[in-house]
Amino acid sequence: MTDPSPTDGHRARLRDRWHRAGSKGFADHELLELLLTYVFRRTDTKPLAKRLLERFHGLKGVLDATPEQIEEVAGAGPRAAEFVSLLRGAMERYFETDVRRTDLLNTPEAVVAYCRAALEGLPHEVFDVIYLTAKNRVLSRERLAEGTIDQAAVYPRKVVTRALAANAAGLVFVHNHPSGDPEPSPDDRRLTQRLRDAAQLVGIPVLDHIIVGNGRHVSFREKGLL
């Protein structure tokens, strides 16, 4: 028979408080501490929770961190890194499920939440395209480029070819600015225009280009840039 851990009573009290009050009854370090108890069954997880929050400047920063960054924190290791990565993936899937059920043009907040869950906090730049049905619902999302995104990295011909293969009736482009500032650069504007012109030649409209930053976003459609 396994001896009880000295932390069992504290964990039981945390779980009881969760059942009574939910997340509103928890500080960030307590919420992360409770989550980590599912990774480390017999270890006091409060010190690790506090180290993670300090290293990444809050709960959002922890969820945005890469597995490699998580592993660098003392006491975390690959298990905690995998767990945080799974949490992030579950969040992305949650918003993806929501956005697939909606008309993206009538519920722009849904697509923004989805894009932020997928791209915000990534340490490098990525450029995705969301393929839409004729009713502006999501068919799929595809990553077109990763690394340094410029006009040479995203090929209009490839975008059009992939859109036709997906039987897309509309396109939404999404990319992130790791700097945190989502304002479009002149290169962003020129690239968007080139992609839009290429898609229009085959009758596929570009409905938006969303740039995700740190807690903010810019929609080309909302700014009148499309």
Image (cartoon, rainbow, N blue to C red):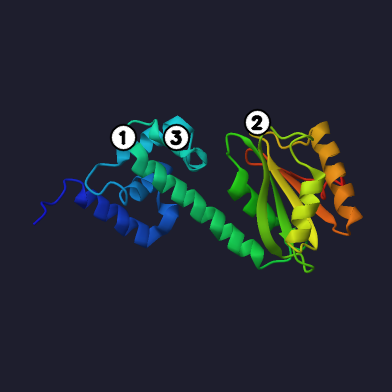
Gap between marks 2 and 1 measured at Cα: 29 Å
Q: Is residue 136 left or right of residue 123?
A: right
According to the image, label 1 marks what residue?
75
- Residue 115 horizontal/vertical position (percent): 65, 50
Callout 2: few (<14), some (14-19), or many (20+) C-alpha neighbours within 10 Å?
A: few
Q: Which quadrant of the figure contains the N terminus?
A: bottom left
Residue at image mark 3: 68
Q: Position of residue 125 (x, y in %)?
A: 65, 36
Front label number (3 vs 2): 3
Mark 3 → mark 1, Cα distance in angstroms: 13 Å
Is residue 36 visible from the viewing direction of this image?
yes
SS type, badge 3: helix
Please name the residue that numbered disc 2 is placed on.
179
Q: Position of residue 211 (x, y in %)?
A: 72, 42
Q: Residues within 10 Å of mark 3 (few under 14, many from 20)?
A: few
- Upstream in the sequence, badge 2 or badge 1? 1
Which amino acid type is shown beneath numbered disc 2? Ser
Disc 3 and disc 2 in contact, CB within 8 angstroms: no
Q: Nearer the viewer, residue 222 or 85?
A: 85
Which residue shows up at 69% across the image and 63% down it?
139
Q: Quadrant of residue 167?
A: bottom right
